[in-house]
Amino acid sequence: MQIQDLKIHGKTFLAPLAGITNLPFRLLVKECGCGVVCSEMISAKGIFYNSENTLKLLTSKHQEQPLSVQIFGCDPDSMAESAKFIQDLKIAAIIDINLGCSVKKVVKQGAGVALMKEPELSKNIFMAVRKAIDLPFTIKLRSGWDYSGEQAFNIAQIAQDCGVNAVIMHPRTASQGFKGRAEWDLIAKLKQQLSIPVIGNGDIHNVEDAKEMMESTCCDGVMVGRAAMGNPFLLSQIDQFLETGSYKKISRHEIFRSMESLICMYVDYFEEGPACKMLRGRLSWFVKAMPGCSEFRKRLASIDSKKAVFALIKEFENSLPSVIK
Ligand SMILES: Cc1cc2nc3c(=O)[nH]c(=O)nc-3n(C[C@H](O)[C@H](O)[C@H](O)COP(=O)(O)O)c2cc1C
């Protein structure tokens, strides 16, 4: 697949997930294998006003390339300036604009999915950002503010006409949040309408779902969010499955080593105390189907050092029946 002049190996995109797709997690997914990793959404205003917390989100390493950096906001000038700022940092292979976030504090300021009610404003943002950057430029949208999909088709057409290079669609409305099922037939319809690549997103839980989405919608690539949170290998498995019809199963050993790798990267990035706190929830996602995982999760809740979490993981790994190790 190609987005503007960017050639992408594979068809998988790690979805932007606020609080999750930070640098350590992106590096882990990339290490396991994946087409493109996306940053969590980053406030254009935060960049504009040099917020320290926001600028930290722009930390990157070359190993994670190609990286898509997602920004959110609703003011064309600050969106364009932020996009140019990111381009000048030379960390992004793609700049993406968020038209999908339905979280109250984002919507209240007129950003995220609220832009889907504002085709004129969206157009001004697309034009301003397109003028400011040469990098490949994508948007990620929902099916609409309310039901029908019409808003998505309208906004996506405007985006294509303004020079946006690909559209990512999560076919749920704002009010649906994450409820119900993603309406994949809207992805198929959008693919028929546009000449730029369309990337489908929503409810891909395993390799078979990804194949089904590709076949039933003819989309150019798939984006995976929640299912990757506890399985960093999934995107690589999807790429293998799409290409060859089979994929390498991941051993328990590899899962535990990936957890250790994530811990080390979290500690490097966030420092030990905060890293251990953040990892308490996240590590249990990796083992949620294993026997004894609820006890492991409980014990994780009091972990506050890298040494202790490594020891707990070893103990849990050794406690598993050998047949499933
Ligand atoms: C915890 C969480 C954080 C998210 N953060 C973002 C975000 O920063 N930007 C964005 O465009 N979408 C965000 N999303 C939406 C996902 O990118 C994706 O569209 C959605 O989860 C559907 O895909 P999935 O079924 O593969 O998870 C988030 C979703 C979750 C669950």
Image (spheres, rainbow, N blue to C red):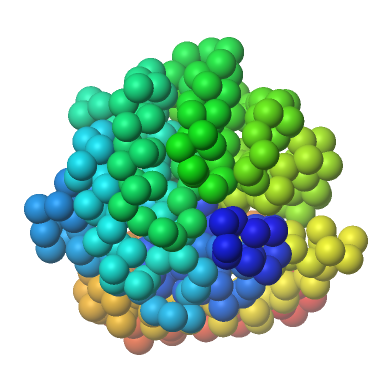
The count of marks equals 0
Residue 285 rendering spot, x and y as whole percentages: 52, 58
As drawn, 16 above or below 243: above
Any part of residue 214 in sight: yes
Residue 294 rendering spot, x and y as whole percentages: 51, 57
> In this view of the protein, which residue sits in the foreground, 157 or 175?
157
In the displayed structure image, the side of residue 299 where residue 313 appears, left or right? right
As drawn, 321 above or below 189: below
- Identified at 76% across, 36% down, the residue is 217
In the displayed structure image, the side of residue 53 where residue 255 appears, left or right? right
In the displayed structure image, the side of residue 123 where residue 43 appears, left or right? left
Residue 169 rendering spot, x and y as whole percentages: 57, 36
* Residue 99 in which image quadrant: top left
> In this view of the protein, which residue sits in the foreground, 17 or 50?
50
- Identified at 58% across, 63% down, the residue is 5
Any part of residue 205 in sight: no
Q: In which quarter of the image is the C terminus?
A: bottom right
Report the residue that reaches farthest toward the right.
245
As drawn, 124 above or below 56: above
* Residue 1 in which image quadrant: bottom right
In the displayed structure image, the side of residue 212 where residue 161 appears, left or right? left
- Identified at 27% across, 48% down, the residue is 80
> In this view of the protein, which residue sits in the foreground, 159 or 140?
159
- Identified at 46% across, 65% down, the residue is 93
Residue 242 rendering spot, x and y as whole percentages: 82, 58
